[in-house]
């Protein structure tokens, strides 16, 4: 904010942060992650900042949703796989690394056959896959499966619901008031902020129990006339950026 005034921004601060990430003015690409609090109205200044940064500085600010638990798990898997592949590629011309890999391969086969001498080929393959999976889990940096959470705030107590109807689109988006009216009629109780996605659908958070109850109510016969033409889901990720 400029001089601490609400609704303003200081683009020079973002230039400085980008420079810290990759030396502003060089030919290298610098990526900076910028987080903002949608509940505090900071999102209203983002469009102006985006336009000024691109016009004056040639810097693009690209919107990005929070990573879903599934995306975090997938990234962890690929991070572990890349470490395997890099070590393997580096060892192609490195005799010492080849010998090291061979040692572990021999020991692994010995241990599997020693511990399970009566195991057949399929059992041996299964045991080796379990050892490989354990090694990748150790390399992933994770301690446990990433639990479900809000896709808007990452709050583990909340779940994100996406709603749309047959007539909504990018050019004809839903409005928060109409979504609020319908969702409350379905028994959601108190509702927080409703965000409209680029495709015209709406997303909002409810507590885990209320989200489950809402989806159950949508499927009830007595609600069929109320929700005709409407669709609700608890998405695993958000492909459309909410505003």
Image (spheres, grey):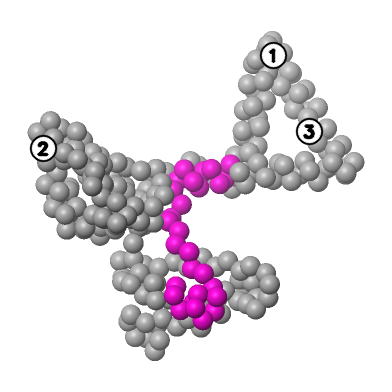
Q: Residue at x 55, y 68 (%)?
A: 32
Q: Which residues are magenta?
A: 50-77
The x, y position of residue 160, in whole percent, is 31, 49
Whether residue 22 is visible, yes or no, is yes
Q: Secondary structure at mark 3?
A: helix
- Front residue of 220/76: it is 220
Q: Secondary structure at mark 2?
A: loop
Which residue corresponds to mark 1? 121
Q: Which mark is residue 221?
A: none
Report the mark closest to the observer, 2 or 3.
2
3D distance between C-alphas at marks 3 and 1 = 20 Å
Q: Which mark is residue 104?
A: 3
Which residue corresponds to mark 2? 225
Main secondary structure along the magenta-highlighted residues: helix
Mark 2 neighbour class, 10 Å CA radius: few under 14, some 14 to 19, many 20 or more = few
The x, y position of residue 233, in whole percent, is 29, 41
3D distance between C-alphas at marks 2 and 1 = 58 Å
Mark 3 neighbour class, 10 Å CA radius: few under 14, some 14 to 19, many 20 or more = few
Residue positioned most to the bottom? 3
Q: Residue at x 65, y 30 (%)?
A: 131
User: Is 53 colored magenta in this rendering?
Assistant: yes
The x, y position of residue 224, in whole percent, is 13, 35
């Amino acid at each position: 904010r400029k001089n601490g005034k609400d609704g303003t921004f200081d683009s020079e601060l973002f230039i400085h942060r980008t420079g810290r990430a990759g030396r502003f003015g060089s030919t290298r690409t610098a990526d900076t992650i910028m987080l903002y609090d949608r509940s505090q109205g900071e999102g209203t200044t983002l469009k102006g900042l985006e336009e000024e940064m691109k016009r004056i500085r040639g810097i693009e600010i690209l919107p990005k949703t929070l990573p879903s638990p599934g995306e975090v798990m997938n990234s962890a898997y690929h991070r572990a796989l890349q470490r395997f592949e890099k070590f393997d590629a580096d060892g192609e011309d490195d005799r010492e690394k080849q010998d090291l890999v061979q040692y572990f391969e021999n020991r692994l086969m010995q241990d599997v056959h020693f511990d399970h001498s009566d195991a057949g080929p399929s059992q041996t393959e299964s045991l080796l896959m379990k050892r490989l999976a354990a090694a990748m889990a150790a390399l992933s940096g994770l301690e446990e499966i990433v639990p479900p959470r809000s896709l808007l705030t990452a709050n583990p107590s909340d779940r994100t619901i996406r709603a749309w109807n047959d007539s909504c689109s990018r050019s004809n988006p839903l409005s928060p008031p109409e979504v609020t009216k319908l969702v409350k009629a379905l028994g959601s109780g108190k509702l927080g902020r409703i965000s409209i996605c680029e495709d015209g659908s709406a997303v909002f958070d409810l507590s885990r129990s209320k989200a489950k109850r809402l989806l159950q109510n949508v499927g009830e016969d007595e609600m069929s006339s109320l929700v005709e033409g409407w669709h609700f889901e608890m998405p695993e990720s958000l492909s459309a950026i909410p505003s």
